[in-house]
Amino acid sequence: MRVLVADRSPAIRTFVCHEIQRSGSDAAECTSEVEFLEKIQDETYDAVIFTDWFSGGGGLRICDTIRSMPHGDDIVILLILPPFAKQDALRAALAAGADECLPSPLNAANFSLRLSAAEQQVNARKERRAAVRAQARAREEAESNARARSEFLACMSHEIRTPMNGVLGMTELLLETELDPSQREFAELARSSAEGLMRILNDILDFSKVDAGKLTLESHEFDLHASIESAVELLAARAHTKDLELSVAIGPSVPRVVSGDSVRLRQILTNLLGNAIKFTEQGEVWVRVANFGDAPGLLRFEVGDTGIGIDDAGRTRLFLPFSQVDSSMTRRFGGTGLGLAISKQLVELMCGEMGVESVPGRGSTFWFTVALKAEHAMVHAAGMHPECWNLRALVVETAPQVRRLLCERLGALGVEADCCESLAAARHLGLEAAEDRRPYAVAFVDEAALMKAALPAGERPDFGQDAPVELFVLTRRVPRIAELPEGMTGLTKPVRRDRLADALNQAMAAARDNRRAQRDEALTAAGAAPPHPPGLRSAAGRRVLVVEDNRINRKVVTAMLNSLGFQVAIATDGLQAVQALAAESFDAVLMDCKMPRMDGWEATREIRRREGTQRHTLIVGLTACAMASDRARCMQAGMDDFLPKPVSKQTLQDLFQRWKLAGTREHVCAT
């Protein structure tokens, strides 16, 4: 080690330097405080030794000066105190930063031991500095790798999504054409494979963003109940294909309007629900949501099933990335093993926890908690028209749990509901209602109950009353809705609250249409013209400019827009888009972002500059980039909305309905 010795006394300097050199270390010396401070700042020393009286009793001040220097904490300070120094002086020296205080006069043997201890301290501090530097280098290297990985993934995501948009879009359009059974099967397999590839791509991208610390949560108001129901509805067909009973129960005290990241919450829920359906061959799958604790926004979600279950050893590997309970399951059930790892990380970002309870052979229940902010400003999305209150409804459902949940939901909507499990029991209830002159206006009948009754094809059930009954058939298979006889309307299970409200509104609208028809007949007989019925708002005549440099993507989007009733014009880059908007007006622009000559962001800024405050054309970013920063960049450029590729016709329809460019039939009894 290298030691600086400072003292006015030649005898003390000679003694100390001799002992230092004898121990194998290097020694330098100085005679004044000014020289000492210059040396300690200009040169590197591992330790310093000086006497308190060297600076006129200012040894404590020098200790403080050394410690305040860069890397001053790494220097070992040995302070020689005057003879008969008191304990207060010793404590003050240690408090000022001295590592050790040596009493004078110095003893050769004792001083040698003190030097050896000081050398050990120096070596320990050198190792600590080396470890800190190594850790800093490792951190910088990790951050650099994370940045490179994130940039690579963003680039690859864009490159993969662009052709995937063509694959998915073309197969969707192909499936809307006339195909023979074999062709339709091949096309559906192609679409299923492409969707599976997109799910894997999204999983890998999400996991990498979380791993690199790039995934951030958004916060916005949304209808929690509708979000949960839409997530369940998304996977209902998959469950019903396996003849699984699927149900969702939302506690009465769960807030409807909350603030949080609805997209990520839905991602967690659909992942758990998809796994439950995947690993369940028979029985049921359910979703339950309830308050957890005193805070209204602290919620507990449960996704349960009657599937294969998980043993203790499997649960220890469950949330590890690229891992499954049993390696053979990858071959049997498929999957990357990333879904649960991503879901757990997302839950933790939401200040929650995730766990599982399972019994092998009897099923599993995955649960997670999240903290959302309960809001009260937004109106409930699935409200009822006042004329639809106090309806009487009849529920015929063979599954007890589904029957109970449906009756509870009807009651929450202000509907008086009676429930039974067969059409025979329903007719008995209808007879009683007719006798009381309180007939049922609407009936919800399970498809299984209709099949058990063995009614002739197309015949409606007899509910024992003369008053007309609006009939809704609860079915687990979406295609069968179109196969229902005239006068029956299908509702896919599990029935969403907004769909249930629409059904009740439809029942009231049917009653009102009957009254209107009777009134129109009377007006016609009297020679007066009946009023026009409500019409349709459509996309007919709406013009959309598609700005896209990829030929296949242009064809996909154009075909989808044409099928929705829009007129389409094409621009192959941003410069053509600016020129097109200068020459004529459009109702909307679908703007790709990465294009030659002028990209979509620059084109949008130029369009907004030219429009000024006099006009504002709807511009939607249509890009293969899927990062949150990409959406922010689109908004900053002046775009109004953002659609990541690949897009579907339903996505486009939802977009234009959201921006009031295409609507639906205006119901008489609307919410």
Image: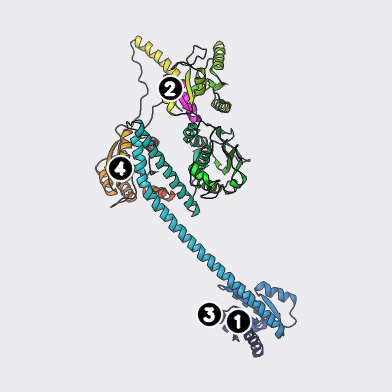
Start and end of the magenta stretch? 489-508
Give the spatial CA distance, label 2 vs label 3: 93 Å
Nearer-the-camera pick, 417 or 307: 307
Q: Amino acid at mark 1?
A: Val
Nearer-the-camera pick, 251 or 366: 366
Snapshot colouring: rainbow
Q: Determine whether 523 is above or below 386 in the image.
A: above
Instruction: Name the residue beneath numbered marker 3.
Output: 42
Give the spatial CA distance, label 1 vs label 3: 14 Å
Q: Earlier in the sequence, mark 1 or mark 4?
A: 1
Give the spatial CA distance, label 1 vs label 2: 96 Å
Quick check: 442 left or right of 553? right
- Using the rendered image of the protein, determine whether residue 115 is visible from the camera's viewpoint: yes
Which one is in front in this view, the residue at disc 1 or the one at disc 4? Answer: 4
Instruction: Name the residue beneath numbered marker 2.
Output: 484
- The N terminus: image quadrant: bottom right
Residue 156 point in image, percent of width and height: 39, 52
Instruction: Name the residue beneath numbered marker 1.
Output: 3
Q: Amino acid at mark 4?
A: Arg
